[in-house]
Image: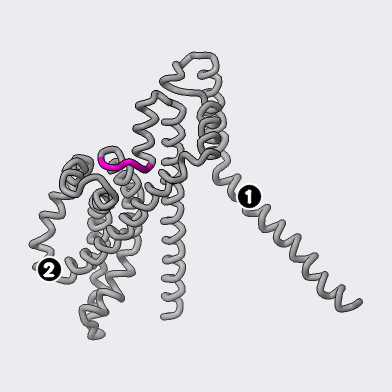
Amino acid sequence: MTMVQTEEAPMRTAAPRASRRASKILGTAARKYGSAIVLGVVLVTVWEIAARNRWVSPFVLPAPSAIWDTMVENLANGLYWHHLLATMWAASLGFVIAAAAAIILAGLLVSIPPLRTAIFPYVVAFQTLPKVAVAPIVVLWLGFGQIAKLFIVVFVCFFPILINALEGLEIRDRDKLELFQSAGANRWQLFIGLRVPGALPSIFAGLHIGAVFALLGAVVAEFVGTREGLGYLLLLEKSQFNVPGVFVILVLLMVIGLVLSWLMRFLESKVSWSKGLDSKAMV
């Protein structure tokens, strides 16, 4: 009997702790995002009233309730899932390839100055090129299909990541540089111990931009060269004058963008946390 009571006691104390922790998290979220939530509710309410009273044409701005009904219906019948996965596959894989290639190339360019002198003008030229204009040419080269879409995604998000990585890998702290040099550090030790830690904020800034551009690139590619994906479905809904359906896809793209942004922030916080642990261990 005593053993049962001693086992149940921690369970009874753990429940209030979990409840308090959940209440604390909800309270923090309410304080942080409360004003944004209230503003969103007000805007949606005004939008609904305006649409129901025909102050705005439904072909211009359908009611939020109509958008919601269309989304629920099409999610239930499975219309969006295949197209959603097609877009996410291209955006995710293209982003990973572009990020890896850009960071590796940035490391090579800062480590080999003659190579940077030769390549950097072309990097700047391609960075200023409107990326959307490249999509039709890529379709002409690679045809309609996943390879062309993947290439467009990589091309769109590669250069912002590269530019930010190059910016971050530059050594600006001369005191630390002299300290490493006085300790006899070689080029590799300088890169790992000095360049990379200082470059993390800039690299993650480029990754944030690249994640958004990856989604943009996937949708643009679906506009011009595929028969699947949310971009293709958006054009299909537009051709059928299904305005609520168009708005549903826009909402889905917005949600995907927010999720990608949150994932990048989460990854950045984890890397920064581990970097802080490494710094404390070194001390």
The crowd level at tag 2 (other Cα within 10 Å; few <14, some 14-19, many 20+) is: few
Q: Secondary structure at mark 2?
A: helix
In magenta stretch: residue 228 = yes
Q: Which residue sits at x=45%, y=37%? A: 251
Residue found at x 31% / y 47%: 213
At label 2, the amino acid type is Pro
Q: Quadrant of the C terminus?
A: bottom left
Please determine whether, in this image, residue 229 is positioned above or below residue 106.
Answer: above
Residue 120 % position (x, y): 13, 58
Does the rendering let one see residue 129?
no
Residue assigned mark 1: 26
Q: Residue at x 43, y 25 (%)?
A: 243
Pick the front one: 178 or 99: 99
Extreme residue toward the right, this view: 1
Query: Label 1 crowding class (10 Å Cα cut-off): few <14, some 14-19, many 20+?
Result: few
**Figure disc tally:** 2
Q: Nearer the viewer, residue 92 or 26?
A: 92
The residue stretch that appears in magenta: 225-229
Q: Label 2: which residue? A: 113
Q: Amino acid at mark 1?
A: Leu
